[in-house]
Image (cartoon, rainbow, N blue to C red):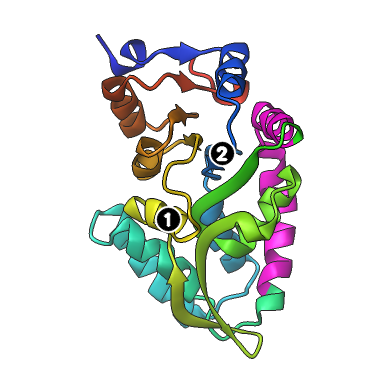
Amino acid sequence: MSNAVSATLLTTAEFHAAVHALSPRVAVFDCDGTLWSGDAGSGFMRWTIDQGLLSQDAIAWLDQRYKGYLAGQVSELAICGEMVQVYRGLRESDMRAAAAEFFSTQIERNIFPEMLTLIRQLQAAGTEIWAVSSTCDWVIDEGVRRFDIPAKRVLAARVAIANGLVTNTILDVPTDEGKVTALARVGLTAPDAVFGNSVHDAHMLAIARRAFPVNPSPALLQRSASEGWPVYYPASVAPA
């Protein structure tokens, strides 16, 4: 029996009902692949290269590192940090302006309406919503504004800013166990509901009162089947 069959699939009505049945006080959401389709982190990297924001030296270095990541020679943690560090020396205001243009032109159309509806319903019921992502904070801050999630409840990859300029000093890269660590730093060790799409979300899914894999990657689908976590696919990414 395939993993796709052994993992219980929820309809939109079942998914929303299961979340609301928890009456969650705190709900935590991954972003790329969970709130919208696609990888905004690597997408932003490619887009800024196309827009000429990076020098040729920076592009060459990042290209080499990203090829190493795809070959399994550079870790998820390392590449997610380096994809923010590569902008060192640029103005943070320019990065935030670039992120705003990138999200509105490249990602906003990929937002899952079912997730937008769910978050708005939870907010209306008083649930505290957090976003956790290994994509840079400039993109995530911009993206979750569409969901009325304030920047103070965003835990994302970020570097220190000095005199308005991006530095290469990493402050956080929430991925894998690092997502649990980031949540613990803000006092969230057992959130009521956690939503994620990747095996890199598995650690934070495991600390939830109830885990909700959304649009799961093959590795997370396998993990969901073994853990007994029902999975949900928004309509635009539902398997045939």
**Span colored in magenta:** 95-123
Residue 50, percent from left and from top: 61, 65
Q: Position of residue 183 (x, y in %)?
A: 46, 53
Mark 1: amino acid: Ala
Residue 98 horizontal side relative to residue 56, left or right? right
Helix, strand or loop at disc 2?
strand
Residue 27: mark: 2
Foreground: 100 or 106? 100
Q: Depth check: 150 or 43 in front?
A: 150
Which quarter of the picture shows residue 117? top right
| Picture mark count | 2
**Amino acid, disc 2:** Ala
Q: In the image, 84: left or right of 176?
A: right
Q: In the image, is residue 142 above or below residue 82?
A: above
Residue at (37, 39) in percent of width and height = 207
Mark 1 surroundings: few (<14), some (14-19) or many (≥20) residues within 10 A:
few
Tell me where residue 191 appears, x and y as whole percent.
48, 40
Q: In this figure, which residue is indicated by the disc labeled 1?
A: 184
- Magenta span has 99? yes
Q: Residue at x 50, y 79 (%)?
A: 56
What secondary structure is the magenta-colored segment mainly? Answer: helix
Residue shown at 53% from the left, 22% from the top: 233
- 23 in relation to 148, above or below: above
Report if residue 42 is visible in the image. no
In which image quadrant can residue 34 be found? Answer: top right
**Where is residue 231 shown, x and y percent of the image?**
45, 21
Tag 1 and tag 2, C-beta contact below 8 Å: no
Q: Considering the numbered disc 1 on the image, is that residue within a helix, a strand or a loop?
A: helix
